[in-house]
Each structure stands twice: as C-alpha cells, then as structure tokens.
Amino acid sequence: MNGHSAIREQVADACHRIAAHGLVVTEAGNVSVRVGGHVVVTATNARFEELTADQVVVVDLDGERVHGDLEPTSELALHLGIYRHFGASAVVHTHAPMATAVGLVVDELPCVHYYMLKLGGSVRVAPYETYGTPELAQSVLTALEGRSAALMANHGAVTHAHSLDAAVDQALLLEWACTLYRNAASMGTPRALDEDRQRAVVETALARMATRPASLPEETS
C-alpha cells in the first residue's frame, strides 16, 4: 500500500484552508477522508496552519493504524461513527469561534436562511460530553441524524459530506450561518423559515434543475 499519499496531501491542504478561514485554534480540530476500507485522518495535536502530509495517518474501519508513525486524532471514534452511520466520504471537526459560541447558548440553530438547507435545515446542538469518548461520538451521531452538520455544546462543530472539499464548504457555511444568527439575535428574535417555506425552497430548486437545458455536445471539426 502506498499510504494514500495524494489523499494525505489533500487532507493537509484542507487543513490549511480551514486554518486560513479561522475555524481552528492551534491544534484544535481534525479532518478525515474515507477511501474504501481505510480512513485518512489527521494525527493528534497537529497544528492545522502548518500541518504536513506526514501528520496524516491511515487507519482501517476498526481504528487500527495501517500507515503513519503518529497517533490518529483523539476524536477518531466520532469520525468512524459518522462513516458507519451516514455513508459519508469526508468529515471535518473544528472549534470554529462563532459555531462554538452559538452552541454555548442554544439547543438548536434555527433555519434562518435557505442556504442552511444545504446542511439539512436547522442544526442541532449535541449535549456536552468529554472529548474523545464514545459518549461524545454517540451524542454527535444523534444530533447529525438527517443532517450534514451539528454543533457540539461547549466544544465546536462537525460536518460531513460526499467529498473533502464539500465537507470544508459545509464547515464554512455553518460558521457563516452561526454568524448570521448571532448578528440577527443582537437586534431581536431572528425569524426562522418554517417547514412549508423550507419545502418550497426545495421544490423550487428541483423544478429549476428539471428545466435546466442539457449540455450541448462539443463541436467537432
């Protein structure tokens, strides 16, 4: 096995992107990608802004290390649980400041903008459990049911998606939504989109996709 070198580089690049957007502080956070029967995941105590491919390890779906000299993140059980339960291809866990702040106050982030439907709508806050424990993993898995994002009380946030880029985009979207909610809440009670309005957005998007013209074939000489 070649250690999934290209994927390890992609994970390192994703960590740099996450750090550049201010979603992590020092070594607080972890990223992984599933590749068949393996999970490519950041090592414990790795600093995102300077993380290298050598600080990304490969484990099997039971969490046993198969490549790399470092120990995988302490939140490995959370990542493996998301892969088992939701069939995701990538997971991003951050201590993003606004997401963490909102998770200190509310039990659920309401769907205050239709873009949040990309996350599944409102975002639940998983009750606090000690980091790195099976209890934390289970708490977050419950909060993620039917969603691609969850906040973690007194801890941070997690997103999962069909690709690494998409999972990072989800993390950025979640931080944006939390910022939007905080700003609105400072002026009054934010208005949330009810289920009928959310359903209308989905139906509109599906209708637009159905009427979008098919790509024309390329011209040939």
Image (cartoon, helix red, strand yellow):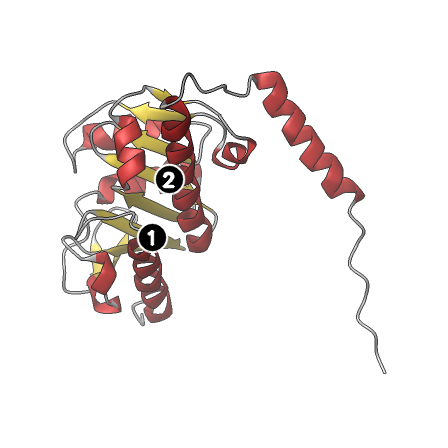
- Answer left or right for 11 relative to 219: left
What secondary structure is found at the residue carrying circle 2? helix
Task: Check the picture and name the quadrant holding the N terminus.
Answer: bottom left
Label at residue 21: 1
Q: Position of residue 130 (x, y in %)?
A: 14, 31
- Can residue 65 be seen here? The reply is yes
Q: Camera-side residue: 195 or 136?
A: 195
Label at residue 175: 2
The local crowd at label 2, few if under 14, some if 14 to 19, many if 20 or more residues have their Cα within 10 Å, is many
Instruction: Note whether 41 is above or below 52 in the view shown.
Output: above
The residue drawn where x is 52% and y is 30% is 113
- Amino acid tagged 1: His
Task: Check the picture and name the quadrant holding the C terminus.
Answer: bottom right
User: Which residue extends farthest bottom?
Assistant: 221
Q: Camera-side residue: 197 or 207?
A: 197
User: Is the residue under label 1 in contact with that under label 2 (CB below 8 Å)?
Assistant: yes
Label at residue 204: none
The residue drawn where x is 59% and y is 24% is 198
Q: Camera-side residue: 129 or 170?
A: 170
3D distance between C-alphas at marks 2 and 1: 10 Å
Instruction: Note whether 165 is above or below 95 in the view shown.
Output: below
Q: Which quarter of the picture shows residue 202?
A: top right
The residue drawn where x is 38% and y is 33% is 178
- Can residue 67 be seen here? The reply is no
Between discs 2 and 1, the one toward the N terminus: 1
The residue drawn where x is 32% and y is 25% is 125
Q: Position of residue 5 (x, y in %)?
A: 32, 70
